[in-house]
Image (cartoon, rainbow, N blue to C red):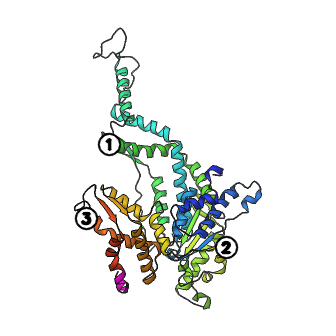
Amino acid sequence: MIDQKTYFTPKQIVEELDKYIIGQKDAKRNVAIALRNRWRRMNVKTDMQGEIVPNNILMIGATGVGKTEIARRLAKIANAPFTKVEASKFTEVGYVGRDVESMVRDLVEQSVNLVKEEKKEEVKVKAEQIVEDIILDALIPPLKSNGFSQKNPASTSTPTGELPQTEQELNEKTRERFREKIRNGEMEDRKIEINVQKPANAGVGMIGGGMMDESSMINLQEMISGMMPKKNKKRKVTIAEARKILMEEESAKLIDMDEVKDLAIKKAENTGIIFIDEIDKIAGGSSKKGGSGPDVSREGVQRDLLPVVEGSTVNTKYGLMRTDHVLFIAAGAFHIAKPSDLIPELQGRFPIRVELDNLTKEDFYHILKEPKNALTKQYEALLASEDVELSFQQDALEEIAETAFHINTEVENIGARRLHTVMSQLLNEFLFDVPDKIGPNAKIIVTREMVKDKLSGLVKNKDLSEYIL
């Protein structure tokens, strides 16, 4: 966790983010510093370690400029528990809906899954050996020894003693041959019968009008299921499928769940990241002027968020979790509301404000060309699965970028998501014709003229776009 090798420097974090996100240098620098400060705090030797709290970040920018992607990629880089929530989904305490503490419970759930995966890797070799024995027993059951050796009439003794003398030895020899075949993957499609643990179905339904939210209901069902005895069920599956099913079961038996819970709580407390999206939707300006109705409810959600963000203890099904050192990243477009419309106490809990830039024509071009998961590379991979080669000329990418930027300017700015619309319109005809009209080993080269021809309708019909769903 605190090993220098496992934590990137701020410069390395920005370089990792650059592989997937174009531009937004200021936002990348701030999240990189916040992530590195985690490592610095965990390496503080004095009592000051508990006093250092993270500087939460408020990202302000239009939709589609990379706010959510930055937070998601950051969590992957850190191998940290991460949960994304929509602020508009929460309701004030006492109303039907999700309460704000549910995001902390979601974070702990993610943390438990991460720790479980780490523990599974640790017990993988032992679990594989046990699973191999179970599969072998299903194929060639071992002979039970009855205390004396019985000669096998089918075998004849030789001076060298090469052939097995007893049924026990013959069984062992056969089992070893089959063990080799299993290890070499020669019997993956053969079907065997295995015993699988069937979880007891609690069958709890909601009584009355929504007194419990969905996550609480799931927790109740899990608790009741855990109290009921588990039943074994016989299933006939291939050896490949049996290996997956049995690995899950045997790994779970080898893992100490109490240790997993303790580690998961610590991991969530020290490295957890909660991303609160659409925070501008709970900011209401009129409530300051004595407003009522939805604005009052929005302010209620903000007041509920406040103790969680500033640090409180939340009860989860895995134990109590403190949120003092969880990093909160909030984001919103703030088209109508302003950050100053949030209640002052909540504003103070997000000291770092980062304004993300709107995407330019050059940004669109780089988004199409550079990221590891660029849309052009995605479509090339899709058509490559049908043995069709797709390529884009440079001037064609420039034309696509210009068209996307132009539509965003004229109609509605939805950021990089506009490229999905444009690319779909451009390539839909090819995607439909492969493989019926365009067969394997074909080459499709997208040129500037093709882009202009296919996308002319998108640009011409911009005046009608507000009436089209």
Q: Residue at x 33, y 78 (%)?
A: 456
Q: Amino acid at mark 1?
A: Thr
Q: Mark 2 Cα within 10 Å, few/some/many (few <14, many 20+)?
A: few
Residue 351 image position (x, y, % from top left): 67, 73
Residue 294 image position (x, y, % from top left): 52, 85
**Disc 1 marks which residue?**
238
Name, please, the residue furthest toward the top.
159
Helix, strand or loop under label 1: strand
Say which of 409 and 132 sits in front.
Answer: 409
The disc at residue 433 is 3
Residues in magenta, as a range: 459-466
The disc at residue 351 is 2
Q: Verify whether residue 62 appears in magenta.
A: no
Q: Chief secondary structure of the magenta span?
A: helix
Q: Residue at x 57, y 50 (%)?
A: 260
Q: Earlier in the sequence, mark 3 or mark 1?
A: 1
Whole-angstrom CA distance, mark 3 to mark 1, is: 37 Å
